[in-house]
Amino acid sequence: MKILVCGGAGFIGSTFIKNYLKNNPNDTITNLDNLTIGSNLQNLTSIENNPNYSFIKNDIKNEKTILDISKDKDLIINFAAESHVDRSIANPKPFIETNILGTYSLLEAVRKYDKSFIHISTDEVYGDAEKNESFMEKSNLNPSNPYSATKASSDLLVSAYERTYGISSITTRCTNNFGPYQFPEKLVPKTIIRLIKNLKVPLYGDGSQIRSWIYVSDHVSAIESIISKGQSGHVYNITAYEEITNLTIVKKILEILGKSENMIEYVNDRPGHDKRYSIDCSKIENSLGWKPKYEFDDALKETVSWYVKNESWWESLIDEKTLHSQPWTL
């Protein structure tokens, strides 16, 4: 099978490519990435000489390029997205352009050449979950910030193309990811890196916001299951059911690194901050037989250890903006 992966130099996309080629050595992957914030070809050095892998630097909004590249592909997977809520609050425009117009560009190629399409989305499109509530795939979309609104828009666009033009498509909605090679602006790597540098860790509000977490290797294994067994026209939620407050995660990282809780700095919460995300993924478990393998605490320790040992990877990626305590104010 010939696959076009869009956004494959990012955290999740690069992890997917490495794992997929390892498990499917006869398939080929073309990775198209514009190498903007969050993308890093160093994530892929282990496979850069693999004859079944190739890289093209370009933008998914470039319709002509996407059409040309897609002609001989069997499947297009879209990881490409502007994905940090804080930055979307400071400047929504790049999120609208990439997440909506970029998805449109890919869908046009899918429609013209009758390709299969997997759209990688997020649980944030569902918005706040009430206590004891977990969203199913058919739950209403209720995004709360510019990032999640653009992802919900792209989800609906995929659904509309499926119904109107009869394209073959699947949408996945996953919870918060963590693991090696995650860009330093995100909560887990940002906390680890600031502590390595002996800087206090900013915690939004009182840190009671609840997120469901999944180790990135579990996420990409779910995507592989969907490629082989998923049904066109379906949405699949993906989660490891690890619902944890931001404060608890920071405290766990402090403990792993042997740091005091005095390193926590409580800052004003960001505008429109969702209190709790929660999804149910019994559909993918029951219909495809997928289940997460990694225990949260073990995976977090592995992740912390990786950042401690790989300062050369992240040092060039950090600056005042990346590690800022309130990025939406910039």
Image (spheres, rainbow, N blue to C red):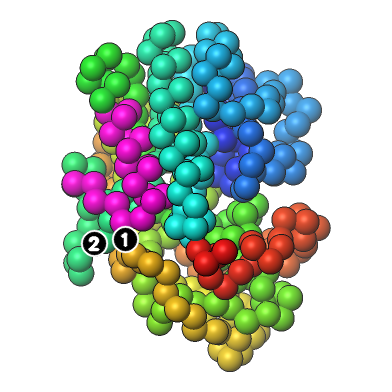
Q: Is residue 183 left or right of residue 93?
A: right
Q: Residues within 10 Å of mark 2 (few under 14, many from 20)?
A: some
Location of residue 71 in the rendering, given as x and y in whole percent from the top left corner: 53, 8
Locate residue 67 relative to residue 206 in the image: left or right: right
Distance Cα–Cα, label 2 vs label 1: 5 Å
Amino acid type at mark 2: Ala
**Residue 225 position in % (x across, y down):** 41, 34
For label 1, count other residues whose C-alpha is less than 10 Å away and answer few (under 14), some (14-19) or many (20+). many
In the image, the segment drawn in magenta is: 139-159
| Contact check, label 2 and label 1, Cβ < 8 Å | yes
Percent of width and height locating residue 288: 32, 35
Q: Which residue is the site of mark 1?
A: 277
Asked if 218 appears above or below 48 in the picture, the reply is below
Res. 37 in view: yes
* Residue at 52 percent of width and 67 percent of height: 329
Establish if 116 lies above or below 99. above
Mark drawn on residue 129: 2
Please say whether residue 210 is visible from this viewpoint. no
Callout count: 2
On the image, which quarter does residue 12 sit in? top right
Nearer the N terminus, badge 2 or badge 1? 2
The location of residue 121, given as percent across then percent down, is: 39, 41
